[in-house]
Image (cartoon, grey):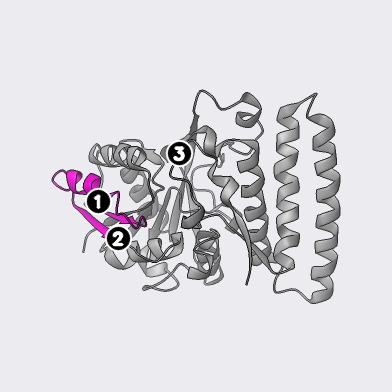
């Protein structure tokens, strides 16, 4: 069996995918690994790029016709052959020693999952108040520190295959269009006794264009984050407790949105941060009311990368 499978979910990001694959070709000191690229674009736009790199590295290209990131990640898992699964987003690219550092940490600690940091880079037209509002701040933990559920995500993760909650479909497709499928999977692993640790050395870079680094994007993303947290922490509570928590959240959201509006002419950075925090509170309330935020609806995603993708989020009831 191959030691590591690098699992990449992609959707209409040809330039970013090419940059990622080039970085994987440049890995140094890595265990034997393969790359699995799963394309969710009906036009299979990533196929030509993947085939071009297949001569340089062991690479398998798949097309997943079912829309949604959960189905794509599940397809990557069942297609892969590695003892460990390295998850990385298609808009990220790793340092040359990325896989080596991940594998060393997994072996040394015996952990079921290792997570690494993200060094953010921004397009020149992203305003400073968005860059500095704190939403993109990198996680800073000690090497080998244990992680809780809210510190996990598939953007730069190294997971032991045998620890997955389901070998065939570890990611719940219910969250395919909303996101949050990774949080729910990692929560399930933690409940079963898995241990997750941090690696300060397994670093990846991530580039943020204006379309995914603007106030509208922050707002819609915060709604989704709030809803995901509610799924994990609140939905098992009694109706009375859920009502109290929802009321508290919406009142706090109204207060914070008002404060953000007041601060905007004076301090856009602080106001942007308040919009994000208030959006999370609003997202919690919406989820308690039975609504979800679909941010991966392909029929609403723009082909023009210059458009703000976050503006195409929609509400749908379960």
Query: Image quarter for residue 266?
Result: top right
| Rendering coords of residue 9 (x, y %) | 37, 54
Range covered by the magenta-colored residues: 34-62
The secondary structure type at the circle numbered 2 is strand
As for residue 55 lying within the magenta part, the answer is: yes
Q: Is residue 172 visible in the rendered structure shown here?
A: no
The secondary structure type at the circle numbered 1 is helix
Q: Residues within 10 Å of mark 1 (few under 14, many from 20)?
A: some
Residue located beneath label 2 in the image: 63
| Rendering coords of residue 234 (x, y %) | 72, 67
Q: Residue at x 52, y 72 (%)?
A: 192
Single out the residue that lies furthest toward the bottom.
238
Q: Are marks 2 and 1 in contact (CB under 8 Å)?
A: yes
The span from disc 2 to disc 1 (Cα, nearest Å) is 8 Å
The span from disc 2 to disc 3 (Cα, nearest Å) is 21 Å
Is 248 situated above or below 240?
above
Q: Earlier in the sequence, mark 2 or mark 3?
A: 2
The span from disc 1 to disc 3 (Cα, nearest Å) is 19 Å
Query: Image quarter for residue 63?
Result: bottom left
Relative to 130, 195 lies left or right: left
Quadrant (top left, top right, bottom left, bottom right) of the N terminus? bottom left
Q: Is residue 183 visible in the rendered structure shown here?
A: yes
Q: Residue at x 59, y 53 (%)?
A: 313
The secondary structure type at the circle numbered 3 is loop
Residue located beneath label 3 in the image: 305
Q: Residues within 10 Å of mark 3 (few under 14, many from 20)?
A: some
Relative to 231, 193 lies left or right: left
Quadrant (top left, top right, bottom left, bottom right) of the C terminus? bottom right
Residue located beneath label 1 in the image: 47
Q: Residue at x 41, y 68 (%)?
A: 163
Relative to 88, 36 lies left or right: left
């Amino acid at each position: 069996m191959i030691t590591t499978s690098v699992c990449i979910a992609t959707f209409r990001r040809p330039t970013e995918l090419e940059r990622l694959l080039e970085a994987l070709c440049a890995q140094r000191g890595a265990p034997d690994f393969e790359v699995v690229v799963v394309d969710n674009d009906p036009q299979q736009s990533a196929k030509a790029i993947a085939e071009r790199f297949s001569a340089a590295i062991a690479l398998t290209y798949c097309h997943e016709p079912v829309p949604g990131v959960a189905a794509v990640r599940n397809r990557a898992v069942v297609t892969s052959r590695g003892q460990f699964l390295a998850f990385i987003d298609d808009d990220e690219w790793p340092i040359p020693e990325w896989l080596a550092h991940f594998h060393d940490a997994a072996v040394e600690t015996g952990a079921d999952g290792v997570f690494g940091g993200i060094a953010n880079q921004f397009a020149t037209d992203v305003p400073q108040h968005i860059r500095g509002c704190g939403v993109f701040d990198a996680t800073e933990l000690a090497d080998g520190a244990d992680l809780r559920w809210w510190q996990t995500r598939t953007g730069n993760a190294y997971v032991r295959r045998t620890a997955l909650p389901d070998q065939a479909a570890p990611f719940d497709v219910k969250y395919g269009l909303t996101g949050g499928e990774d949080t729910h999977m990692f929560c399930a692993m933690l409940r079963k006794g898995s241990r997750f640790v941090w690696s300060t050395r397994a670093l990846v870079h991530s580039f943020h264009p204006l379309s995914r680094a603007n106030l509208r994007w922050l707002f819609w993303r915060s709604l989704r984050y709030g809803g995901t947290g509610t799924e994990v922490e609140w939905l098992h509570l009694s109706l009375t407790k859920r009502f109290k928590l929802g009321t508290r959240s919406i009142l706090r959201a109204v207060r914070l949105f008002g404060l953000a509006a007041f601060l905007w002419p004076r301090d856009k950075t602080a106001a942007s941060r308040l919009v994000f925090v208030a959006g999370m509170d609003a997202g919690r309330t919406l989820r308690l009311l039975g609504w979800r935020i679909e941010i991966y609806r392909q029929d609403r995603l723009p082909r023009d990368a210059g458009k703000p993708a976050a503006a195409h989020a929609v509400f749908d009831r379960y």
